[in-house]
């Protein structure tokens, strides 16, 4: 019923993922509606969203979704909100900046000497051969960043979801009142 008549090609699907044809503003509004319509309390949705946003600020790029789902389940947050938040925060446009930022925070926590040991260009093979020079500062730096992102995203998410639920409730009441008035005439 809701499928496309013609299936999208893989290339088109990838292009839509990185650059939506409907635009970023419209896709953002769609995600806001999706988050507002999720089942659950505003608190559980905000907890799940914050868990996903915080986990997206860790260096475990291939495991963000799994870690966010488990963490949201443990703290009784919405796993669906956590999944959406990992995609919003940890997308291909933001991951390089997040990784660089958490590396710098971790290197400062360890001391400036760890910044000087990296070559000019860091490749995946370098990370696998020298994991402590790259992953240790990133893992350490991700802790305060993830906590800050959790706190920064929780309160606005809870406020926005509760406001969305309230407006939706008031709209439904208004629809009921107008149907009652129309049926009495």
Image (spheres, grey):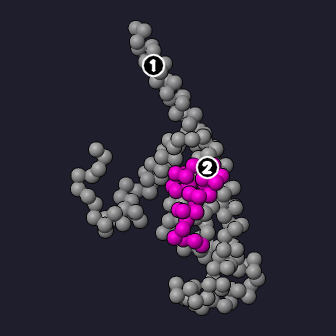
* Nearer the camera: disc 2 or disc 1: 2
At which x and y percent is residue 133?
65, 85
Identify the residue position indicated by label 2 in the image: 77
At which x and y percent is residue 27?
43, 53
Identify the residue position indicated by label 1 in the image: 178
Q: Secondary structure at mark 1?
A: helix
Residue 61 magenta: yes
| Picture layout, residue 25 above or below residue 185 | below
Is 110 situated left or right of 12 in this image? right
At which x and y percent is residue 115?
68, 86
Q: Main secondary structure of the magenta part?
A: helix
Residue depicted at x 56% and y 55%:
82
At which x and y percent is residue 101?
63, 73
| Picture layout, residue 177 above or below residue 93 | above
Mark 2 or mark 1, earlier in chain: 2
> Can you say which quadrant of the picture contains the C terminus?
top left
Residue depicted at x 59% and y 58%:
70
Label disc, if present, on residue 142 of the rendered structure:
none
């Amino acid at each position: 019923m809701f499928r496309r008549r013609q299936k999208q090609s893989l290339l088109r699907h990838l292009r839509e993922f990185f650059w939506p044809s409907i635009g970023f503003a419209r896709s953002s509004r769609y995600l806001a509606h999706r988050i507002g319509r999720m089942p659950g309390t505003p608190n559980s949705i905000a907890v799940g969203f914050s868990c996903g946003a915080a986990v997206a600020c860790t260096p475990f790029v291939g495991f963000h979704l799994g870690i966010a789902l488990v963490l949201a389940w443990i703290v009784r947050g919405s796993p669906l909100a956590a999944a959406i938040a990992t995609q919003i925060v940890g997308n291909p446009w933001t991951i390089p900046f997040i990784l660089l930022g958490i590396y710098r925070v971790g290197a400062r926590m360890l001391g400036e000497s760890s910044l000087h040991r990296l070559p000019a260009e860091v490749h995946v093979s370098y990370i696998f051969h020298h994991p402590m020079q790259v992953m240790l500062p990133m893992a350490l730096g991700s802790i305060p960043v993830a906590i800050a992102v959790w706190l920064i995203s929780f309160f606005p998410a809870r406020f926005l979801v509760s406001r969305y639920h309230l407006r939706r409730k008031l709209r439904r009441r208004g629809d009921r009142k107008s149907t009652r008035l129309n049926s009495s005439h």
